[in-house]
Amino acid sequence: MVNKKYLLLAGLCAMFAIQPAFAQESSGAQWSARDMTYRGDSYDVLDSNYVPRSRMDQHRKFLNHQYAFPAKPRNMWEVGVGAGLYNILGDVSSLTPFTKGSKGGYGLHAHIRKSWGYFLSTRLQYIYGIGRGQAWQEDRNYKRNPAWADNGYQPLVQVPGTPGANIATDPVFWNYRMESHQLSLDLIGSLHNIRFHKARTGLSVYALVGIGAIAYNTRVDALDANFQKYDFDAIAGGGAQVLPQISENRKQIRDGLLSAQDGTFETEADNERDRRRTSIFNNKTIQATPSLGLGVQIRLSKRFNISLEDRVSIPWDEDLLDGQRWVSQVEGAPVMSNQNDLINYFSLGLNFNLGNKTKSVEPLYWLNPLDHAYNELSYPRHMILPDPTLPDSDGDGITDQFDKCPGTPQGVAVDSHGCPLDTDGDGVPDDRDKQLITPTECQPVDADGVGKCPCPDGCGSMAPACGSISAGSIVFSGSSARIPSAGQGLLSALAAQMMANPTCKVVITGAGNKSKVQQQRSWDRVNAIIEFMSEKHGIDRNRFIFQYGVAGDPNSVLYRAALPGEEGPANVAPPFPNLRRN
């Protein structure tokens, strides 16, 4: 029967493990008004620092909306140490550290663990164990166990010629001390981190299956301090085999044995010497050992957690861990046990996540794989959203929110503020200016935009030959060079006008000159418009005049018909190509 104090300890440990599971989870999730992003109690999926070089190609495709799934981040290693109860489940009752007067079984362990996904991880664990056992019932039929038969004890023998008649013999009480070194490679599965209604949990439940080896040596306390056999009849009060098998008598006999024996374990236990390795692990027996186990981890912080685990190891074809492989029979010869010995290791551990927190996230079994999906639904930063439709009452390409001159007549070219374009700055809009380019020295001008200088030939004409090509502007958002849907509509109208005037050129002018970034962004946007007109509508690129980096609103690109004789390049090298956005 399992010791009551052992059960009490297990219950207390279980209560200690379960309590944090009912506590309110600590979530660092918060909304940042400054940069309009959501900071969950996790890592930023868009942060390239967490992505190893081998998965950077997938990460770039994800950022560019070419692949739906983010790359798996680099995650920390876990290292841990711990201690616990180490018991042999065999033919001899094991002792716990709480048994009166005994130094029961205990174990120490250390491990290193790596997560390969949100479910699977592997762990390499070393366990040093000491197992102790003491039988409370006597045995007299031990003639095949050399630990007793070779130390002067007289086993049960039959009277010759008289079946069923036995000669009085020495009783013995099985005991052992087993020392072991165990190394195991474990495959661990965790499911509790996948949460559908909470950001995360501080409790991780897992199961393990392992394969490894054990090197062990078992010894028996068969002789006293003077290397003489024990008088077990006197120690046990005589005839333990015939006493009632009740708990009080068991405890009384066991306590008496533990007090009388010197605990030196000087005798080699029964073993199979063909399994010995004379130069490895101090002459210990080596055996392959698979394992099974269950555990629970409690997260204390991003670095620390504690674990409570129960592991059962099953040495391959091994019945000598407790030094006893024979089942005694009062009549006849003893027979071999048909059950292998097992090892139970119930432990408490302290674990630490090892790694640079700016480059590696916590082990993946602590992260919720649904975190990014739910955050993106509630606080979208990466998903592709449709371009907003903003009101433009006068149809000049400038939304009402930013239009400083509402009600501009249809077809009149406007600047980035929605006001009629005035190329020469004489105060008369181009649509009413009879002298489109009035020199500064000839201003001020009259109501028709004509200056005080003598009028050259043809200055009184209303508009140049390409006056049917309207002017306008396209407003970009943020730092993007992607043409918005409203701008694409304006360019479609411009393409139709250019096809109707095949000899006319159009000037594309990008604003923004206060920094290198603005100049490169201005170039990108002008180039995007010219490529759009060439590839989408088939307009010859040489019919455009490329201008960028002029003063003005850095979010807008203007277009207008080229003046008579006005020329310029259709292709310009980018000013700062290394600053171009990915």
Image (cartoon, rainbow, N blue to C red):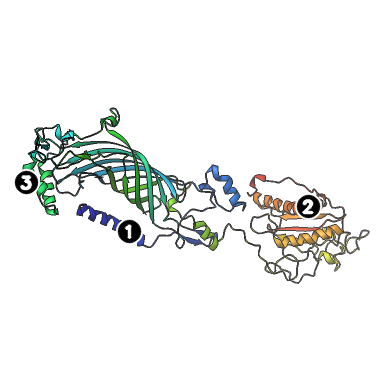
Residue type (three-letter) at the residue carrying disc 3: Gly
**What's the distance in space between the residues labelled 3 and 2, CA to CA?**
108 Å
Residue 490 lies, with reference to residue 104, above or below; the image says: below
Residue 142, position as x, y percentages in the image: 16, 38
Query: Of 363 and 214, which appears nearest the observer?
Result: 214
Q: Nearer the viewer, mark 3 or mark 2?
A: 3
Kindly tell me whether residue 344 is visible in this rendering: yes
Amino acid type, callout 2: Ser
Numbered badge on residue 237: 3
Contact check, label 3 and label 1, Cβ < 8 Å: no
Query: Left of 564 or right of it: where is 300?
Result: left
278, above or below 46, in the image: above
Please provide percent x and percent y for residue 523: 71, 51
Q: Which residue is mark 1?
A: 18
Residue at label 2?
534
Relative horizontal placement of residue 86, taking residue 394 as reference (left or right): left
The residue drawn where x is 74% and y is 60% is 488
Quadrant in the rendering for residue 529: bottom right
Please give left or right for residue 137 compared with residue 87 in the image.
left
The three-letter amino acid code for the residue at tag 1 is Ile
Q: CA distance from mark 1 to mark 2?
A: 67 Å
Label 1, residues with CA under 10 Å away: few <14, some 14-19, many ≥20: some
Is disc 1 placed on a helix, strand or loop? helix
Q: For the point 81% across and 58% down, which residue is it?
A: 495
- Quarter assignment of residue 509: bottom right
